[in-house]
Amino acid sequence: MSFKEKLNSTQMPQHIAIIMDGNGRWAREKGEMRVFGHQNGVSAVREALEGAVEIGLKYLTLYAFSTENWNRPEFEVNALMELLVNSLNEELPTFQKNNIRVNCIGRTSDLPVHCQATLQDTIDQTKDNLGCTLTLALSYGSRQEILEATKAIALKVKNNQLAIEDIHEDTISQHLYTHDMPDPDLLIRTSGEERISNYMLWQIAYAELFFLPIMWPEFSREHLFECIYYFQNRERRFGKTSEQL
Ligand code: IPE
Ligand code: IPE
Ligand code: MG
Protein backbone atom coordinates (compact mmCIF):
# COMPACT_ATOMS: atom_id res chain seq x y z
CA MET A 1 0.00 0.00 0.00
CA SER A 2 1.40 3.37 -0.94
CA PHE A 3 1.79 6.13 1.63
CA LYS A 4 -0.84 8.17 -0.19
CA GLU A 5 -3.48 5.47 0.37
CA LYS A 6 -2.56 5.34 4.07
CA LEU A 7 -3.18 9.06 4.65
CA ASN A 8 -5.95 10.10 7.00
CA SER A 9 -8.02 12.68 5.14
CA THR A 10 -9.26 14.24 8.40
CA GLN A 11 -5.74 15.09 9.57
CA MET A 12 -4.18 16.70 6.55
CA PRO A 13 -1.62 19.48 7.04
CA GLN A 14 -2.51 22.89 5.65
CA HIS A 15 0.96 24.17 5.00
CA ILE A 16 4.16 22.31 4.12
CA ALA A 17 7.49 24.14 3.90
CA ILE A 18 10.46 22.57 2.14
CA ILE A 19 14.18 23.34 2.20
CA MET A 20 15.24 22.01 -1.21
CA ASP A 21 18.85 21.04 -0.54
CA GLY A 22 21.52 18.85 -2.13
CA ASN A 23 21.43 19.81 -5.82
CA GLY A 24 25.15 20.55 -5.95
CA ARG A 25 26.22 17.34 -4.21
CA TRP A 26 23.88 15.26 -6.37
CA ALA A 27 25.53 16.67 -9.50
CA ARG A 28 29.11 16.38 -8.19
CA GLU A 29 28.51 12.69 -7.34
CA LYS A 30 27.71 12.21 -11.00
CA GLY A 31 30.84 14.11 -12.05
CA GLU A 32 28.71 16.99 -13.33
CA MET A 33 28.72 20.72 -12.59
CA ARG A 34 26.60 21.96 -9.67
CA VAL A 35 24.27 23.77 -12.07
CA PHE A 36 23.28 20.39 -13.56
CA GLY A 37 21.88 19.58 -10.11
CA HIS A 38 19.82 22.76 -10.05
CA GLN A 39 18.43 21.94 -13.51
CA ASN A 40 17.40 18.49 -12.29
CA GLY A 41 15.93 20.00 -9.15
CA VAL A 42 13.18 21.51 -11.29
CA SER A 43 11.54 18.11 -11.87
CA ALA A 44 11.56 17.51 -8.12
CA VAL A 45 9.72 20.83 -7.68
CA ARG A 46 7.15 19.56 -10.17
CA GLU A 47 6.82 16.32 -8.18
CA ALA A 48 6.31 18.19 -4.91
CA LEU A 49 3.75 20.50 -6.47
CA GLU A 50 1.81 17.74 -8.22
CA GLY A 51 1.80 15.73 -5.00
CA ALA A 52 0.50 18.77 -3.14
CA VAL A 53 -2.27 19.26 -5.70
CA GLU A 54 -3.20 15.55 -5.57
CA ILE A 55 -3.92 15.71 -1.85
CA GLY A 56 -5.52 19.17 -1.92
CA LEU A 57 -2.79 20.90 0.12
CA LYS A 58 -3.53 24.61 0.54
CA TYR A 59 0.02 25.97 0.99
CA LEU A 60 3.38 24.76 -0.26
CA THR A 61 6.38 27.01 0.45
CA LEU A 62 9.73 26.26 -1.18
CA TYR A 63 13.07 27.71 -0.10
CA ALA A 64 14.62 28.43 -3.48
CA PHE A 65 17.27 31.09 -2.72
CA SER A 66 18.43 32.44 0.61
CA THR A 67 19.90 35.84 1.46
CA GLU A 68 23.15 33.91 2.13
CA ASN A 69 23.08 32.29 -1.34
CA TRP A 70 24.12 35.66 -2.85
CA ASN A 71 27.61 34.75 -1.60
CA ARG A 72 27.88 31.88 -4.12
CA PRO A 73 29.97 32.26 -7.29
CA GLU A 74 28.41 34.70 -9.74
CA PHE A 75 28.12 31.99 -12.39
CA GLU A 76 25.95 29.83 -10.12
CA VAL A 77 23.80 32.75 -8.95
CA ASN A 78 23.15 33.77 -12.57
CA ALA A 79 22.31 30.20 -13.55
CA LEU A 80 19.80 29.95 -10.69
CA MET A 81 18.15 33.23 -11.73
CA GLU A 82 17.82 32.08 -15.36
CA LEU A 83 16.44 28.75 -14.22
CA LEU A 84 13.83 30.59 -12.18
CA VAL A 85 12.70 32.72 -15.12
CA ASN A 86 12.59 29.76 -17.54
CA SER A 87 10.75 27.52 -15.09
CA LEU A 88 8.12 30.14 -14.29
CA ASN A 89 7.50 30.69 -18.01
CA GLU A 90 7.34 26.97 -18.77
CA GLU A 91 5.13 26.08 -15.84
CA LEU A 92 2.53 28.83 -16.25
CA PRO A 93 0.07 26.55 -18.15
CA THR A 94 0.46 23.94 -15.36
CA PHE A 95 -0.25 26.57 -12.70
CA GLN A 96 -3.42 27.58 -14.54
CA LYS A 97 -4.56 24.00 -15.21
CA ASN A 98 -4.05 22.97 -11.57
CA ASN A 99 -5.52 26.14 -10.04
CA ILE A 100 -2.19 27.10 -8.42
CA ARG A 101 -1.59 30.62 -7.17
CA VAL A 102 2.06 31.67 -7.19
CA ASN A 103 3.32 33.91 -4.43
CA CYS A 104 6.76 34.88 -3.18
CA ILE A 105 8.43 35.88 0.07
CA GLY A 106 11.81 37.49 0.60
CA ARG A 107 13.63 40.62 -0.49
CA THR A 108 12.66 40.19 -4.12
CA SER A 109 13.77 43.74 -4.92
CA ASP A 110 17.31 42.28 -4.78
CA LEU A 111 16.59 39.96 -7.75
CA PRO A 112 17.66 40.96 -11.27
CA VAL A 113 15.01 43.21 -12.84
CA HIS A 114 13.94 40.69 -15.50
CA CYS A 115 13.42 38.03 -12.79
CA GLN A 116 11.27 40.43 -10.81
CA ALA A 117 9.23 41.12 -13.95
CA THR A 118 8.63 37.42 -14.71
CA LEU A 119 7.81 36.72 -11.09
CA GLN A 120 5.33 39.61 -10.90
CA ASP A 121 3.74 38.54 -14.17
CA THR A 122 3.30 34.96 -12.86
CA ILE A 123 1.86 36.26 -9.59
CA ASP A 124 -0.59 38.53 -11.45
CA GLN A 125 -1.67 35.85 -13.90
CA THR A 126 -2.33 33.26 -11.19
CA LYS A 127 -3.82 35.56 -8.53
CA ASP A 128 -7.40 34.26 -8.97
CA ASN A 129 -6.44 30.59 -8.62
CA LEU A 130 -7.88 29.35 -5.36
CA GLY A 131 -6.40 25.84 -5.16
CA CYS A 132 -2.88 25.51 -3.81
CA THR A 133 -0.74 28.56 -3.03
CA LEU A 134 2.83 27.92 -4.13
CA THR A 135 5.13 30.35 -2.32
CA LEU A 136 8.71 30.72 -3.49
CA ALA A 137 11.16 31.99 -0.88
CA LEU A 138 13.58 34.07 -2.95
CA SER A 139 16.38 36.16 -1.50
CA TYR A 140 14.70 35.05 1.70
CA GLY A 141 16.24 35.28 5.15
CA SER A 142 14.20 34.87 8.27
CA ARG A 143 16.32 37.23 10.40
CA GLN A 144 15.96 39.89 7.71
CA GLU A 145 12.19 39.29 7.74
CA ILE A 146 11.99 39.65 11.52
CA LEU A 147 14.19 42.76 11.39
CA GLU A 148 11.91 44.40 8.81
CA ALA A 149 8.84 43.50 10.89
CA THR A 150 10.45 45.00 14.00
CA LYS A 151 11.19 48.26 12.20
CA ALA A 152 7.65 48.48 10.80
CA ILE A 153 6.15 47.91 14.27
CA ALA A 154 8.53 50.44 15.86
CA LEU A 155 7.52 53.02 13.27
CA LYS A 156 3.83 52.52 14.08
CA VAL A 157 4.58 53.00 17.77
CA LYS A 158 6.58 56.14 17.04
CA ASN A 159 3.72 57.55 14.94
CA ASN A 160 1.17 56.76 17.67
CA GLN A 161 -0.60 54.25 15.42
CA LEU A 162 0.08 51.39 17.82
CA ALA A 163 0.43 51.23 21.62
CA ILE A 164 3.16 49.05 23.12
CA GLU A 165 0.54 47.13 25.16
CA ASP A 166 -1.16 46.21 21.88
CA ILE A 167 1.89 44.39 20.50
CA HIS A 168 1.03 40.69 20.68
CA GLU A 169 2.43 37.57 19.01
CA ASP A 170 -0.13 38.11 16.27
CA THR A 171 1.19 41.62 15.65
CA ILE A 172 4.56 40.13 14.79
CA SER A 173 3.02 37.41 12.58
CA GLN A 174 1.04 40.07 10.74
CA HIS A 175 4.19 42.01 9.88
CA LEU A 176 6.08 39.04 8.42
CA TYR A 177 6.17 38.25 4.69
CA THR A 178 3.92 35.28 5.52
CA HIS A 179 1.16 37.41 7.09
CA ASP A 180 -1.50 35.93 4.79
CA MET A 181 -0.80 32.24 5.39
CA PRO A 182 -0.97 29.82 8.33
CA ASP A 183 2.27 28.65 9.95
CA PRO A 184 3.76 25.47 8.41
CA ASP A 185 2.61 22.24 10.07
CA LEU A 186 5.54 20.38 8.57
CA LEU A 187 9.04 21.31 7.49
CA ILE A 188 10.96 18.97 5.20
CA ARG A 189 14.68 19.29 4.38
CA THR A 190 16.45 17.03 1.91
CA SER A 191 20.21 16.26 1.64
CA GLY A 192 20.69 14.92 5.18
CA GLU A 193 21.65 18.30 6.64
CA GLU A 194 19.83 18.87 9.91
CA ARG A 195 19.66 22.63 10.17
CA ILE A 196 17.22 25.42 9.42
CA SER A 197 19.55 27.79 7.49
CA ASN A 198 17.60 30.96 8.32
CA TYR A 199 14.21 29.65 7.12
CA MET A 200 10.94 30.75 8.76
CA LEU A 201 12.38 30.90 12.27
CA TRP A 202 9.23 32.45 13.77
CA GLN A 203 6.74 30.44 11.74
CA ILE A 204 8.13 26.94 12.47
CA ALA A 205 7.89 27.32 16.27
CA TYR A 206 5.68 24.20 16.42
CA ALA A 207 6.23 22.59 13.01
CA GLU A 208 7.13 18.90 12.82
CA LEU A 209 10.58 18.56 11.26
CA PHE A 210 11.60 15.91 8.73
CA PHE A 211 15.17 15.52 7.51
CA LEU A 212 15.41 13.20 4.51
CA PRO A 213 18.73 11.56 3.49
CA ILE A 214 18.03 11.97 -0.24
CA MET A 215 19.23 14.85 -2.42
CA TRP A 216 16.65 17.29 -3.78
CA PRO A 217 16.72 16.05 -7.43
CA GLU A 218 15.71 12.61 -6.08
CA PHE A 219 12.62 13.91 -4.30
CA SER A 220 9.31 12.48 -5.52
CA ARG A 221 5.68 12.90 -4.50
CA GLU A 222 5.92 9.58 -2.65
CA HIS A 223 8.46 11.22 -0.28
CA LEU A 224 5.95 13.99 0.33
CA PHE A 225 3.21 11.47 1.14
CA GLU A 226 5.61 9.53 3.37
CA CYS A 227 6.39 12.66 5.42
CA ILE A 228 2.69 13.46 5.77
CA TYR A 229 2.00 9.87 6.87
CA TYR A 230 4.62 10.10 9.63
CA PHE A 231 3.40 13.59 10.50
CA GLN A 232 -0.08 12.15 11.09
CA ASN A 233 1.39 9.49 13.35
CA ARG A 234 3.31 11.89 15.57
CA GLU A 235 1.74 13.08 18.78
CA ARG A 236 1.58 16.87 18.71
CA ARG A 237 1.23 17.91 22.32
CA PHE A 238 1.84 21.67 22.14
CA GLY A 239 3.17 21.64 25.67
CA LYS A 240 0.40 19.48 27.16
CA THR A 241 0.73 15.90 28.41
CA SER A 242 -0.33 12.86 26.38
CA GLU A 243 -3.20 12.27 28.81
CA GLN A 244 -4.65 15.71 28.16
CA LEU A 245 -5.00 15.17 24.42
C1 IPE B 1 19.97 23.60 -2.93
O1 IPE B 1 21.04 22.82 -3.30
C2 IPE B 1 19.66 24.71 -3.88
C3 IPE B 1 20.01 26.06 -3.41
C4 IPE B 1 20.48 26.35 -2.24
C5 IPE B 1 19.80 27.15 -4.32
P1 IPE B 1 22.54 23.27 -3.02
O2 IPE B 1 22.99 24.10 -4.18
O3 IPE B 1 22.65 23.90 -1.70
O4 IPE B 1 23.29 21.88 -3.06
P2 IPE B 1 24.39 21.38 -2.03
O5 IPE B 1 23.80 21.52 -0.65
O6 IPE B 1 25.58 22.23 -2.23
O7 IPE B 1 24.61 19.95 -2.40
C1 IPE C 1 19.44 26.54 2.22
O1 IPE C 1 20.37 25.71 1.60
C2 IPE C 1 18.87 27.50 1.23
C3 IPE C 1 18.04 26.90 0.17
C4 IPE C 1 17.69 25.66 0.07
C5 IPE C 1 17.56 27.83 -0.81
P1 IPE C 1 21.94 26.03 1.67
O2 IPE C 1 22.62 24.90 0.98
O3 IPE C 1 22.19 27.38 1.15
O4 IPE C 1 22.21 25.99 3.23
P2 IPE C 1 23.54 25.75 4.04
O5 IPE C 1 24.54 26.72 3.53
O6 IPE C 1 23.96 24.34 3.80
O7 IPE C 1 23.14 25.96 5.46
MG1 MG D 1 23.02 23.20 0.15
Image: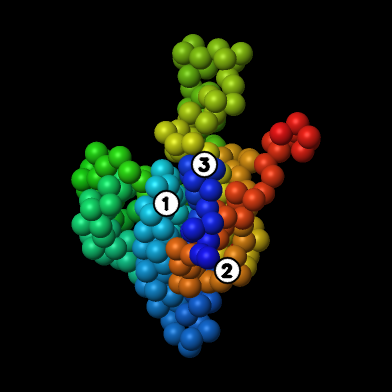
Residue highlighted by disc 3: 10
Residue 34, placed above or below residue 7:
below
Q: Residue at x 53, y 61 (%)?
A: 3
Q: Nearer the viewer, mark 2 or mark 3?
A: 3
Q: How many marks?
A: 3
* Picture disc at residue 55: 1
Q: How far is mark 3 from mark 1, CA to CA?
A: 12 Å
Q: Is mark 2 within 8 Å of ligand 1?
A: yes
Q: How far is mark 2 from mark 3, CA to CA?
A: 30 Å
Q: Residues within 10 Å of mark 1 (few under 14, many from 20)?
A: some
Q: Residues within 10 Å of mark 2 (few under 14, many from 20)?
A: many
Q: Pinpoint residue 59: horizontal percent, then vertical percent.
A: 43, 45
Q: Residues within 10 Å of mark 3 (few under 14, many from 20)?
A: few
Q: Nearer the viewer, mark 3 or mark 1?
A: 3
Q: Pinpoint residue 181: horizontal percent, then vertical percent.
A: 44, 36
Can residue 120 be seen here? The reply is no
Q: Residue at x 21, y 57 (%)?
A: 93
Q: Secondary structure at mark 1?
A: loop
* Picture disc at residue 191: 2
Residue 43, placed above or below residue 183:
below
Give the residue type that dot 1 points to. Ile
Q: Secondary structure at mark 2?
A: loop
In-front residue for pair 47/204: 47
Q: Residue at x 48, y 68 (%)?
A: 219
Question: Which badge, 3 or 1, comes first in the chain's sequence?
Answer: 3
Q: Pinpoint residue 99: horizontal percent, then vertical percent.
A: 27, 47
Can residue 97 be seen here? The reply is yes
Residue 73, placed above or below residue 150:
below
Question: Which badge, 2 or 1, comes first in the chain's sequence?
Answer: 1
